[in-house]
Amino acid sequence: MNETVTLTIGKQKNIALIAHDGKKAELIQWCKDNSEILKRHFLCGTGTTARMITDATDLPVRGYNSGPLGGDQQIGAKIVEGKIDFVIFFSDPLTAAPHDPDVKALMRIAQVYDIPFANNKATADFLINSRFMDEEYDHEVINFKQNIANRAETLPTQM
């Protein structure tokens, strides 16, 4: 069995929108500025951010829990399930976040599944204006079934 599998991000992207409190206004403005592109895709986000974007724009954003209440982990689980394939996360590097381990876990799972992850406006601008926004994108990820099988064969079975 192959060590990697090819996954395809479709033409219509499933985009998660997340922002720390100090960056919510910036993300909302970014969504307004890019609404013509964003309205062609499925949008979701953590609770407060999703609600604020929906209220301030004409964009429907499905809300999960607030980040500190597990929203980051919900988004990570959706990445694992193949239901989110693009993350825009305006993080605030100058303010301590009590759920920082959750944020790091979300970033890690986005890396494992090789999905685009913007953590600031400049990166988000580059990504959303990429030619890949309007076409399918194939990418290689670890063949998780094969990885599990290999680990099961190499780990000791005696307790």
Image: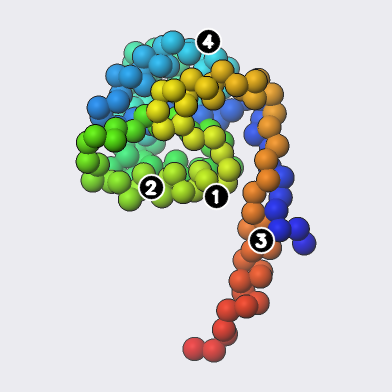
The spot of residue 2 in percent (x, y) is 75, 58
Check the image and name the residue furthest to the right.
1
Amino acid type at mark 1: Val
Q: Of the residues under marks 4 and 3, which one precedes in the sequence?
A: 4
Secondary structure at numbered mark 4: helix
Count of numbered circles on the image: 4
In the rendered structure, which amino acid carries the disc numbered 2?
A: Lys
Task: Indicate which disc, 3 or 1, sits on the residue closer to the N terminus.
Answer: 1
The x, y position of residue 98, in whole percent, is 23, 46
**Residue receiving disc 4:** 36
Looking at the image, which residue is at 22% across and 36% down?
A: 95
| 4 or 1: mark nearer the eye | 1
In-image side of 136 versus 91 (left or right): right
Question: Which mark is first along the chain, 2 or 1?
Answer: 2
Mark 2 or mark 3, earlier in chain: 2
Mark positioned earlier in the residue sequence (4 or 1): 4
Whether residue 71 is visible to the viewer of this picture, yes or no, is: yes
Q: Depth-wise, is mark 2 or mark 3 nearer the camera?
A: 2
Q: Is residue 139 left or right of residue 13?
A: right
At numbered mark 2, what does the secondary structure look like: helix, strand or loop? helix
Q: Residue at x 36, y 14 (%)?
A: 29
Mark 3 — residue?
Answer: 145
Which dot marks residue 112? 1
> Horizontal placement of 5 versus 121: left or right?
right
Label at residue 104: 2
Task: Report crowding for label 4: few under 14, some 14 to 19, many 20 or more residues within 10 A (C-alpha).
Answer: few
Alpha carbon distance from label 3 to label 1: 14 Å
